[in-house]
Image (spheres, helix red, strand yellow):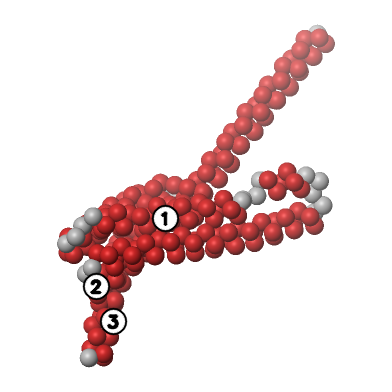
Amino acid sequence: MASISNIQELAKNDKEKQTMQVDQNLEVEIVDYSKRAQWLRAAVLGANDGLLSTSSLMMGIGAINQDAKSMILTGTAGLVAGACSMAIGEFVSVYSQYDIEVSQMKRENATELEEKKKKLPSPLQAAGASAFAFAIGAIVPLLAAIFVKDYHVRLGVMVSAVSLALLGFGGLGAYLGKAPLVKSSLRVLIGGWLAMGITFGLTKLAGITGLSMVN
């Protein structure tokens, strides 16, 4: 009887160990997925920012200058400046977080400091990802406008391309954030239209007012 009880106890312990191992594996997978989702969502937001800021700049310069070259140069400058700004801002932000967490580990006398430091976010990786995501978004209006000579057609093509991209980025962001797909996509689209429309209108007004004052 004692041996049977021992066998049953060993079997029970093995089963518990297997269950704990499965739970640990599942926990690791959930954590990894969560980290990936955060990175993807940040990339989507960066791309959306690049798309909207660059297209608004191009619409603004297009309000007072119908020359395609001026719009393309403005969009290119916006892409480069925005990507650099995003990279530097993200680098400084993540590096500050990195320093704070390392200091906290040192205060706690962490025995595995180097191992824990490897799990912290990389400032260079964050900077590169932000700049790349911004550039991906910013290149959409540039590609939409660069091959179209006619001014009005160029504006129409650019707004159409940007609108489709806004819907796409808005839908992807909603999917990653588990938000309502249609509602979130439309919110991003309408917000983008407002940004481009306000930039175009105010720049047009400023151009007319400035020209009147000069004359």
Q: How far apart are marks 1 and 3 (CA)?
A: 28 Å
Query: In the image shown, does 107 or 175 lie closer to the viewer?
Result: 107
Question: At x 62% / y 28%, what residue is drawn?
Answer: 22
As drawn, 57 above or below 39: below
**Which one is earlier in the sequence, the residue at label 1 or at label 2?**
2
Which disc is residue 135 wearing?
Answer: 1
Using a 10 Å C-alpha cutoff, classify the residue at mark 2 as few (fewer than 14 neighbours), some (14 to 19) or many (20 or more).
some
As drawn, 213 above or below 19: below
For mark 2, what is the residue?
65
**Which one is earlier in the sequence, the residue at label 3 or at label 2?**
2
Label 3 or label 2, whichever lies nearer to me, is 2
Q: Are marks 1 and 2 in contact (CB under 8 Å)?
A: no
**Which one is earlier in the sequence, the residue at label 1 or at label 3?**
1
Label 2 SS: loop
Position in image of residue 109 (x %, y %): 82, 52
Amino acid identity at mark 3: Ala
Label 3 SS: helix
Q: How far apart are marks 3 and 2 (CA)?
A: 12 Å
Residue 76 vs residue 87: left or right?
left
Q: Distance between the residues labelled 1 and 2?
A: 24 Å
Amino acid identity at mark 1: Ala
Question: At x 55% / y 45%, what residue is drawn?
Answer: 35
For mark 3, what is the residue?
206
Amino acid identity at mark 2: Asn
Residue 181 vs residue 86: left or right?
left
Using a 10 Å C-alpha cutoff, classify the residue at mark 3 as few (fewer than 14 neighbours), some (14 to 19) or many (20 or more).
some
Position in image of residue 39 (x %, y %): 51, 49
Q: Can residue 163 be seen in this view?
A: no
